Amino acid sequence: MSLSASTSSSYERFSDTEGPEKQPPKILFKVGLLSVLLGTFLGVYGVISRTSLSTPQQFGLGATGYFLTAVCPIALLLLIDIKDKADLKNNEKQSYNFYAGRKLIGQIKKVVGLGMLCASLSIIVFFWPLAQEFAK
C-alpha cells in the first residue's frame, strides 16, 4: 500500500512541474492544403475557359491561382519554421512537441511541393494572353 501512495504522489509532482506538451496547430496544414486545392481549381478553370475570358480576367485568374498555390503555402511553412526556431532560441524548452512540430513541417513541405506543381496551370493562364500577342 505504501508503494502505490508514493507512486501517485511522484506522478502528481511530475504532472504539476512539466505540464502537457503543446501540439502545433494542425489548422495551418489544412489551410495550406485548401489554398492549394482552390488555386488548382482556378488554374484548371482558367486553362479550360481561356478562350472565353478577357485578357484582364485571365491575368486576374492566373495571379490569384498562383498566389493560392505557391505563395500561401510557402508563407505558412515559413511562419511555422520561424516560430519554431524563435522558440528554440529564446527558451531551452520548446513550445511544441518536437516530433509533432517536425511532422507538421514535413506535411506542409509536401503541400508546398504539390502547390509548386499545380502553380504551372496558373502560370499558363497568366501568360496566355501575352503568348497570343507575341504569336501574332
Image (spheres, rainbow, N blue to C red):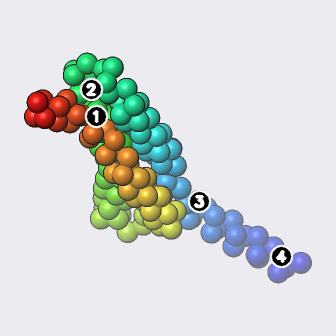
Q: Which residue is label 1 attached to?
A: 125
Numbered label attached to residue 10:
none
Q: Nearer the viewer, mark 3 or mark 4?
A: 3
| Residue 3 placement, left or right of 45 | right
- Residue 17 screen position, x and y as percent: 56, 64
Q: Nearer the viewer, mark 4 or mark 2?
A: 2
Residue at 56% x, 65% y is: 18
Q: Residues within 10 Å of mark 2 (few under 14, many from 20)?
A: many
Query: Looking at numbered disc 2 in the image, what kind of residue is underneath it?
Result: Gln
Q: Secondary structure at mark 4?
A: helix
Furthest-right residue in view?
1
Q: Secondary structure at mark 2?
A: helix
Tell me whether the residue at label 2 lies in contact with that at label 3, contact meaning CB atoms closer than 8 angstroms: no
Numbered label attached to residue 58:
2
Q: Secondary structure at mark 1?
A: helix
- Residue 2 screen position, x and y as percent: 84, 79
| Residue 132 placement, left or right of 25 | left
Residue 101 visible in this rendered orientation of the protein: no
Residue at 28% x, 34% y is: 125
| Residue 112 placement, left or right of 12 | left
Q: Is 27 placed above or below 134 here? A: below
Query: Looking at numbered disc 3 in the image, what kind of residue is underneath it?
Result: Pro
Q: Which residue is label 4 attached to?
A: 4
Tell me whether the residue at label 1 lies in contact with that at label 3, contact meaning CB atoms closer than 8 angstroms: no
Measure the alpha-carbon separation of dots 1 and 3: 48 Å
Measure the alpha-carbon separation of dots 4 and 2: 71 Å
Tell me whether the residue at label 1 lies in contact with that at label 2, contact meaning CB atoms closer than 8 angstroms: yes
Q: Is 11 placed above or below 132 here? A: below
